Image (tube, rainbow, N blue to C red):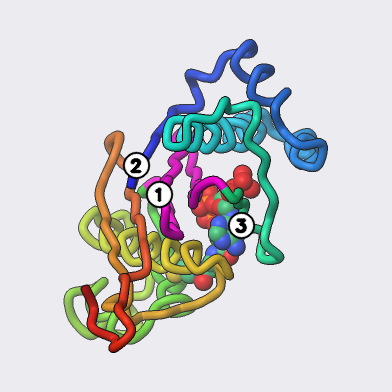
Amino acid sequence: MQIYTYDIRKLNNDEYRKWYSMMSDDRKKRVDAFRYEDDRKRSVAGEMLARTAISEMCGIAPENITFERTRYGKPYTSLAEFNISHSEDIVVCAVDKAPVGIDIEKIRPVNLKTAKKVFSENEINYLFGHTPEEKEFINTDNTEILSRFFELWTKNEAVGKCVSTGLIHDENYDNYDIETFSIDNGYIVSVCQKKKTVPNGTVL
Ligand SMILES: CC(C)(COP(=O)(O)OP(=O)(O)OC[C@H]1O[C@@H](n2cnc3c(N)ncnc32)[C@H](O)[C@@H]1OP(=O)(O)O)[C@@H](O)C(=O)NCCC(=O)NCCS
């Protein structure tokens, strides 16, 4: 698997126009509908990374790659498997032959009440390092807790994005290969692929 990263602050007008011009009319409409320039840049940069990654993997010119979307919104092409994620200034794209999901989040203060809504009991115990009391679900800027929060968050998102529905909460991480790492001082990335199994179910 290859992972490409890009800082949207590097995307100048010429580059923006070049990659925008390759997009489908539908995609252009989505980009044009964004109110903020950074949202437009994240979207164009995501497709730029996907085209570059697939072009390098398959030896096809970036402008000759076409994308479709699943009914859940995941972009795909018949040429390769890929997935895009963006957060603040950074866009990431993973490309491979087997389905892949990737999620990036900038580490930032959060209200831990969110954890209750999205994480399982086991995940919450891991997040706090113990079984928390009700009063501990508060706003926090504790770096250790935030690092674990976004580790769990990006893992769940990467799994959901790998299987394309973007909606599952499959805590059985044993079914997946997931890597989590930090980049660019303050971002956490998780990337996920389903483990390969042979017919008798043995995990390779
Ligand atoms: C659709 C979803 C996957 C997007 O995630 P996000 O964090 O808002 O955004 P990201 O930057 O990571 O990813 C966006 C990109 O993912 C891709 N994408 C969109 N829908 C997707 C889907 N269903 N599956 C995989 N990838 C998808 C697109 O390339 C999109 O970028 P683009 O529209 O510019 O092309 C997300 O809203 C979602 O449904 N997540 C799962 C919800 C969940 O269960 N979360 C648990 C958290 S603990």
Give the magenta part as a residue range.
79-106
Residue beneath the point at 76% across and 36% down: 24
Name the amino acid type tagged 2.
Answer: Gln
Q: Which residue is mark 3?
A: 74
Badge 1 element:
strand
Q: How many marks?
A: 3
Q: Ligand 1: does it lie within 8 Å of the C-beta at label 1?
A: no
Which residue is the extreme one toward the left?
129
Disc 3 under 8 Å from ligand 1? The reply is: yes
Residue 104 magenta-drawn? yes
Q: In the displayed structure, does residue 109 sit left or right of residue 19?
A: left
- The residue at which mark 2 appears reads as 2
Q: In the image, is the residue at mark 2 within 8 Å of ligand 1 by its beta carbon?
A: no
Query: Looking at the magenta stretch, what is its main secondary structure?
Result: strand
Q: In what element is the residue under mark 3? A: loop
Image quarter where ligand 1 lies = bottom right
Query: Is the residue 49 above or below the residue 179 in the image?
Result: above
Nearer-N-terminus badge (3/1): 3
- Along the horizontal axis of the image, is 89 left or right of 33? left
Residue 181: x and y, percent? 25, 50
Residue under circle 1?
96
> Is the residue marked by circle 2 packed among few (<14), some (14-19), or many (20+) residues within 10 Å?
few
